[in-house]
Image: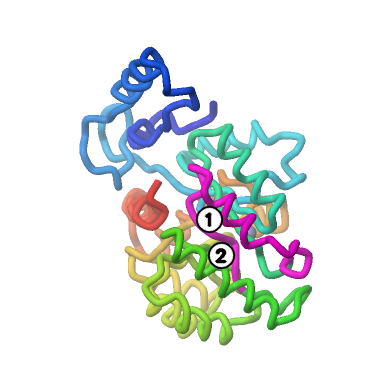
Amino acid sequence: MVACSRCCYEATVRPVPLVNHSTPIAQIWALLYISSQLCTIADPRVCYNADMQPEVCLIDTHAHLHHAAFDDDRVAVLERAAAAGVARIIEIGYDLSSSRAALALAEQHTHIYAVVGIQPNYAHEAPPDWLAQVRTLAAHPKAIAIGEIGLDYYWDHAPHAQQEDFFRAQLTLARELDLPVVIHSRDAEADTVRILQDAAQDQPGIMHSFSGGWDYAAACLAVGFMLSFSGPVTFRKAHALHEVAHRTPLDRILTETDSPYLSPHPMRGKRNEPARVRLVAERIAELRELPLEALAQAVWANAMQILRI
Ligand SMILES: [Zn+2]
């Protein structure tokens, strides 16, 4: 298993291995296992090292590691992430089969969690019972959010009305299931804000790979959402995004890679991987004139709060 062995909180949330708990021996074994994993220090929002000191533990809140781009070296990619201090990876589905793949990966790795849903570019391909299928996938113990959902007027694969229907239906589903949402929005700022204001007030949500100006950021923050920054915040000329990363309240910031896409500077254009979330975190810390440790601790606490992992 690849995981952040330095992080005490990892131990507190490690699930009991899937066993049949119906026999007394299995129940005793499960209890022993749980007690052996419990961490005695208190604050679950903080990541600790083996000496019980707060640690720089990073989180990649958005990756697509089931992508074929990782078929040849997925294990090495996970090892590099762990070596870079990436203690949690959130694996994101964009249609039914990638949502199933995200769950399969999460089943194999303690520190990986899955997000399930239909991304707008795949709405037109979804079967008639797609919502029931997403609901079933979301019942999996390692499914922690509904996503990525939203609007994409850049690729424009599905009609706008259909994108909006899928977006609203999945916002409603997330509210019913008491799960946060992960939002994908591209070239659709006005409609995204309109729908969020109308249907997602006070719903826990993440604007994935946020890339826009301060007015758009402020509108998303006003709905109550967090902003997750990725590679583009490291680009030298992304001045508007630098301003957003500087002005967003510290308790609303998350970090991600969107691997295999959006590789940060100086690896721009190459295949991205979760280890590089460190470059994103370093750049945000620099923009805010904070030590990396302080930024990482804040992001960690934010992620634990919204994702409840
Ligand atoms: Zn994505």
| Mark 2 CB near ligand 1 (8 Å cut) | yes
Which residue does the numbered mark 2 point to in the structure image? 209
Q: Is residue 39 left or right of residue 75?
A: left
Q: Which residues are magenta?
A: 122-150
The earlier-in-sequence mark between 1 and 2 is 2
x and y percentages locating residue 87 in the rendered image? 45, 40
Quadrant of the snapshot with the N terminus: top right
The residue positioned 56% from the left and 75% from the top of the image is 168
Q: Helix, strand, or loop for circle 2? A: loop
> Dot 1: within a 10 Å radius of its alpha carbon, few (fewer than 14), some, or many (20 or more) residues?
many
Discs 1, 2 touching: Cβ within 8 Å:
yes
Callout 1, which amino acid? Glu
x and y percentages locating residue 127 in the rendered image? 75, 62
In which quarter of the view is residue 4 placed?
top left
x and y percentages locating residue 266 in the rendered image? 63, 55
Q: Foreground residue, 199 or 49? A: 199
The residue positioned 63% from the left and 39% from the top of the image is 104
- Res. 256 mark: 1
x and y percentages locating residue 230 in the rendered image? 55, 60
Callout 2, which amino acid? Ser
> Dot 2: within a 10 Å radius of its alpha carbon, few (fewer than 14), some, or many (20 or more) residues?
many
Judged from this view, the residue extending furthest toward the top is 25
Q: Is residue 21 left or right of residue 251?
A: right
Q: Is residue 104 left or right of residue 138?
A: right
The residue positioned 63% from the left and 62% from the top of the image is 131
Q: Is residue 93 left or right of residue 155?
A: left
Distance in Å between CA atoms under marks 1 and 2 = 7 Å
- Res. 33 mark: none
Question: How many badges with numbers are in the image?
Answer: 2
Position of residue 256 relative to residue 37, above or below, is: below
